[in-house]
Image (cartoon, grey):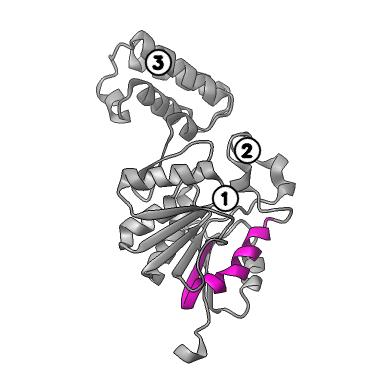
């Protein structure tokens, strides 16, 4: 079987099953089976699949048809122009989270903390973009292992801690805290896409009954960890901007930044300056 025929058959199967972007998905899975980049498929449509390549491709298609996200099959996801390894221990990085990077880069800081790091996408990206001293925390040992491996592979100096939010972080030690916390309400669990509900880690998805519990805990502890005048930057779940802004009453320069679709996506706030430091 040629690569072109395999693509046509795979696309048809995925389309019939209602899988989004079936052609692109077939291309990604076939390229992964061939251990090639997608461009190879366009340049060599006549490539004859070896038996092992066909077996791998068939298994990948079967997994995707069962709902397993493509990124967990290929174990890869791009974020901010870099390729990160992902496993079922971590949330798949979304393009929307790149807005957190953009806002964080505006705020700056020599010591940065990523709370609930998952794959390490935020921590690794900010370290490589700024050269700052960066730490990352996660309550999941599996996620911390993935984040540390991504940091090593991409050459980022990131210290990874296994702890609940910021409990192991020293007082006044950070200039900037970033986080993409779990913010899906448990009440919305049944309405999630099966790829998310059945495969992504629930500890990284659900923020309690209302989706706001982790925001509340982060906002409550951030003043302890931030230096005077330090910044807190967090991704926002859909419809929770007003609630999170209310939690930040008493902070300075609270701003909400929309994404390209105009949806409130990132909230930033500055810890009040200590009177002794102006």
Residue 224 drawn in magenta = yes
Give the residue at x 46% y 19%.
10
Give whichever of discs 2 and 3 has the lower sequence position: 3
Quick one: SS at disc 3? helix
Quadrant location of residue 133?
bottom left
Asked if 106 appears above or below 154 in the picture, the reply is below
- List x then y, in percent, for residue 139: 57, 50
Residue 11 drawn in magenta = no
Residue designated by label 1: 139
Quadrant location of residue 250?
bottom right
Give whichever of discs 1 and 3 has the lower sequence position: 3
Give the residue at x 47% y 29%.
73
- List x then y, in percent, for residue 115: 52, 58
Give whichever of discs 2 and 1 has the lower sequence position: 1
Give the residue at x 46% y 75%.
230
Instruction: Give the label, 1 or 3, closer to the camera.
Output: 1
Compute the Cα span from label 2 to label 3: 27 Å
Residue designated by label 2: 193
Compute the Cα span from label 1 to label 3: 42 Å
Instruction: Give the label, 2 or 3, closer to the camera.
Output: 2
Residue 6: mark: 3
Compute the Cα span from label 2 to label 1: 25 Å
Quick one: SS at disc 2? loop
- List x then y, in percent, for residue 142: 52, 41
Q: Magenta segment range? A: 211-234
Q: Are marks 2 and 1 in contact (CB under 8 Å)?
A: no
């Amino acid at each position: 079987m040629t690569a072109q025929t395999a693509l046509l058959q795979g696309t048809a199967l995925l389309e019939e099953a209602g899988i989004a972007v079936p052609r692109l998905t077939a291309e990604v899975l076939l390229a992964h089976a061939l251990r090639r980049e997608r461009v190879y498929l366009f340049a060599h449509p006549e490539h004859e699949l070896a038996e092992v390549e066909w077996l791998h491709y068939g298994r990948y298609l079967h997994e995707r048809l069962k709902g397993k996200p493509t990124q967990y099959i290929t174990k890869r996801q791009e974020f901010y122009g870099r390729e990160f390894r992902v496993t079922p221990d971590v949330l798949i990085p979304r393009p929307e989270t790149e807005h957190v990077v953009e806002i964080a880069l505006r705020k700056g800081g020599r010591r940065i903390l990523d709370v609930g790091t998952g794959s390490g996408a935020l921590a690794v990206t900010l370290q490589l973009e700024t050269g700052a001293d960066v730490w990352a925390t996660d309550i999941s040992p599996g996620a911390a292992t993935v984040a540390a491996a991504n940091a090593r592979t991409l050459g980022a100096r990131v210290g990874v801690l296994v702890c609940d939010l910021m409990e192991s972080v020293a007082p006044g030690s950070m200039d900037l805290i970033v986080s993409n916390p779990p913010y899906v309400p448990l009440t919305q669990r049944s309405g999630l896409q099966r790829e998310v509900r059945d495969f992504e880690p629930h500890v990284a998805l659900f923020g309690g009954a209302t989706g706001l519990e982790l925001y509340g805990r982060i906002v409550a502890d951030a003043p302890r960890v931030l230096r005077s005048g330090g910044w807190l930057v967090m991704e926002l779940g859909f419809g929770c901007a007003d609630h999170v802004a209310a939690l930040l009453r008493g902070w300075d320069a609270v701003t909400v930044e929309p994404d390209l679709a105009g949806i409130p996506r990132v909230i930033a706030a500055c810890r009040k300056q200590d009177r002794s430091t102006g």
